[in-house]
Image (cartoon, rainbow, N blue to C red):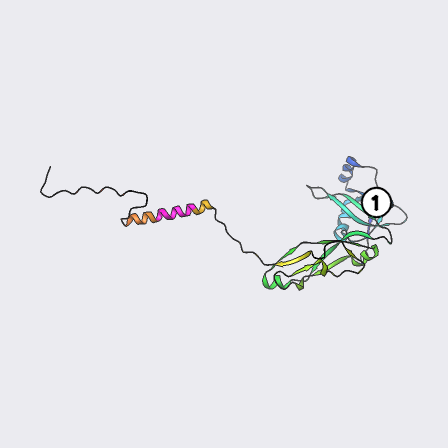
Amino acid sequence: MANYALKALSREKVGKQTKSLRKSGQIPAVLYGHGTKNINLMVEAKEFAKLFAKAGYSHLLDLNTGGANPVKVLIHDIQKDPIKDNIIHIDFYQIKEGEKITTEIRLVFINEAPAVKELGAILVTNYHNIKIKCLPETLEKIGEVNVDLSILKNFADGIHIRDLQLPKDVELLESADEIIVIATEPKEEVVEVAPAAVSEIKTVGEEAAAEEGAKEGEVPAGKEAPAAAPKAEKGKTK
């Protein structure tokens, strides 16, 4: 199991003053936990981004806040800028030995689904993380959970949360009947024709038929036949 460590510095700037911290490449953060006082911190943005990409919410971190020993924490929550999508605030939760914690563990999808390779199925994934409750030492052993896609052989085959292999002392906080991933049959594309287009096609067809009929001496529907020219009587002149 990999060990993750992060350095943090205390900060005095709060509220709108944290804007200057972000411009300097720092992310405002707060450390809290059961029976501990909240501490305002800041961490280096690039360093945290690299660590979060590997650790996520499901790995314990050694957070060095300048004290004699680092503290064991979880990344409890992050906030992102809705426009730029960069991290603008972090919540660290300090764990207590022997006390169960609530967190999320990452699901890692492994192997190829035969339903996809042989039948052209489409995988619909509903979960990438699941919520659990366990002791910190158990979380360190789990890290992340593999989801084996090789059992998906036919359309409608799915993997449920109850199918995950987890230690007995891990409490699932999700419904066991929820589907993590399912192999679905691809839908055929149906091209819809607008009513106006259908009417236009019909009109063009009718006009073409009328023109063809006119060539053969037929009278198009809705039109009167022209009056016949009077025939000259033999032997009579005006």
Left or right of 59? Residue 67 is: right
The boundaries of the magenta stretch are 199-208
Left or right of 238? Residue 137 is: right
Near-viewer residue (150 or 64): 150
Placement of 83 over or under 60, stated as above or below = above
Crowd class of label 1 (few under 14; some 14 to 19; many from 20; radius 10 Å)? some
Residue 32's quadrant in the figure? top right
In percent of width and height, residue 69 lies at 89, 49
Residue 115's quadrant in the figure? bottom right
Amino acid at the residue labelled 1: Tyr
| Image quadrant containing the C terminus | top left
Prevalent SS, magenta region: helix
Near-viewer residue (66 or 38): 38
Magenta segment includes 201:
yes
State the residue position of label 1: 32
| Image quadrant containing the N terminus | bottom right
Placement of 125 over or under 79, stated as above or below = below
Considering the numbered disc 1 on the image, is that residue within a helix, a strand or a loop?
Answer: strand
Residue at 39%, 46% (x, y): give it. Answer: 203
